[in-house]
């Protein structure tokens, strides 16, 4: 076992030879959009993301399905599966089976197996003082998903969020491997602060991020101001307060930093002199990276888990 559960990494990594290690992960959730096909796409991209965050390439996937057979037609489930299969085909990941159960609430996701060279595994634990922090997707999907459920999301918000969530992190992973980075994670349910917190704890460092540099999906700050906020985001913020100095950040901005994401981008720590090369590699892959902060040395006052300072 090269990577287990100790460092809160995105996936487990098990070496099977000097050249090959398996990357294994699983993820599934209830619908976050109204369209069945899009839900399948998003769920598949979200599950695959954990493999990409570890620097791996997905090989095979098993579907996990919970379906209320007496309440929803199986044709609708077919649309969900078609959406997942479309993203798997894009990822060149083979669907090899799965399992379904009768459930009171629909659920869909994947257990994914990928491969990575044992010496090229990217974990949470390698960030070093002086590293730049780069984020590859804007945040705000949790707020928009809540707005969709409440019927207050604009068509632009819905379309932009779905496009972002269904887009694979494959290009970003290729850019990381090309340049060489020190640490990475994907930004999902614990929000930006929560996942950065995992990096600083595992790496023994602290971090500084610039609020104005965080890329946002359209209109999400207004949603936060209006209280269109999922419960998970509020719980994330309460948890992150233990290791974050939020300074003068207003409540809507604090909520955005903790917003519970689905199929978010990669948060990457890269040696400062290589940040330009990483941004170029991301651009070459059709991706956009934003420098949102830096890694700093952990001070005594930061405590045993490190500290995130928001400016």
Image (spheres, rainbow, N blue to C red):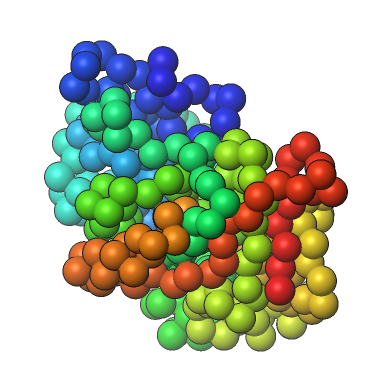
The C terminus - image quarter: bottom right
The N terminus - image quarter: top left
Query: Would you say 4 lies left or right of 307 here?
Result: left
Quarter of the image where one finds residue 137: bottom left
Foreground of the two, 303 or 53: 303
Query: Would you say 268 lies left or right of 280 here?
Result: right
Note whether 292 is above or below 212 in the view shown: above
Whether residue 230 is visible to the viewer of this picture, yes or no, is: no
Note whether 173 is above or below 247 in the view shown: above
Note whether 104 is above or below 290 in the view shown: above
Query: Would you say 213 lies left or right of 304 here?
Result: left
Residue 52 x %, y %: 33, 45
Q: Residue at x 39, y 62 (%)?
A: 273
Residue 109 x %, y %: 40, 41
Residue 263 x %, y %: 44, 55
Note whether 178 is above or below 152 in the view shown: above
Q: Residue at x 26, y 48 (%)?
A: 177
Q: Residue at x 61, y 81 (%)?
A: 212
Q: Residue at x 38, y 56 (%)?
A: 42
Foreground of the two, 200 or 90: 200
Foreground of the two, 112 or 22: 22
Whether residue 159 is visible to the viewer of this picture, yes or no, is: yes
Labels in figure, total: 0
Residue 291 x %, y %: 48, 70
């Amino acid at each position: 076992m090269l990577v287990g559960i100790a460092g809160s990494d995105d996936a487990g990594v098990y070496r099977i030879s000097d050249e090959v290690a398996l990357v294994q992960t699983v993820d599934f959730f209830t619908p976050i959009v109204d369209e069945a096909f899009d839900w399948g796409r998003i769920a598949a991209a979200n599950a695959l993301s954990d493999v990409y965050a570890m620097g791996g390439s997905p090989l095979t996937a098993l579907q996990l399905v919970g379906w209320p057979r007496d309440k929803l037609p199986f044709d609708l489930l077919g649309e969900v599966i078609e959406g997942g299969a479309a993203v798997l085909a894009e990822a060149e990941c083979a669907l090899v089976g799965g399992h379904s159960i009768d459930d009171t609430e629909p659920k869909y996701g994947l257990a994914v197996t990928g491969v990575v060279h044992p010496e090229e595994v990217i974990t949470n634990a390698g960030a070093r003082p002086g590293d730049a922090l780069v984020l590859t997707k804007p945040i705000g999907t949790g707020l928009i998903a809540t707005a969709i459920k409440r019927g207050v999301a604009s068509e632009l918000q819905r379309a932009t969020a779905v496009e972002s969530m269904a887009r694979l992190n494959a290009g970003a992973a290729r850019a990381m491997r090309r340049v060489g980075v020190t640490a990475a994670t994907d930004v999902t349910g614990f929000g930006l602060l929560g996942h950065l917190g995992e990096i600083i704890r595992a790496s023994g460092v602290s971090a500084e991020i610039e609020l104005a540099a965080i890329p946002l999906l359209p209109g999400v700050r207004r949603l936060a101001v209006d209280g269109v906020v999922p419960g998970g985001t509020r719980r994330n913020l309460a948890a992150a307060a233990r290791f974050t100095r939020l300074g003068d950040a207003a409540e809507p901005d604090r909520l955005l930093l903790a917003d519970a994401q689905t199929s978010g981008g990669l948060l990457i720590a890269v040696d400062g002199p290589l940040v330009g090369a990483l941004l170029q590699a991301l651009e070459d892959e059709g991706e956009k990276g934003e420098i949102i902060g830096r890694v700093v040395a952990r001070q005594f006052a930061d405590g045993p888990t490190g500290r995130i300072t928001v400016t």
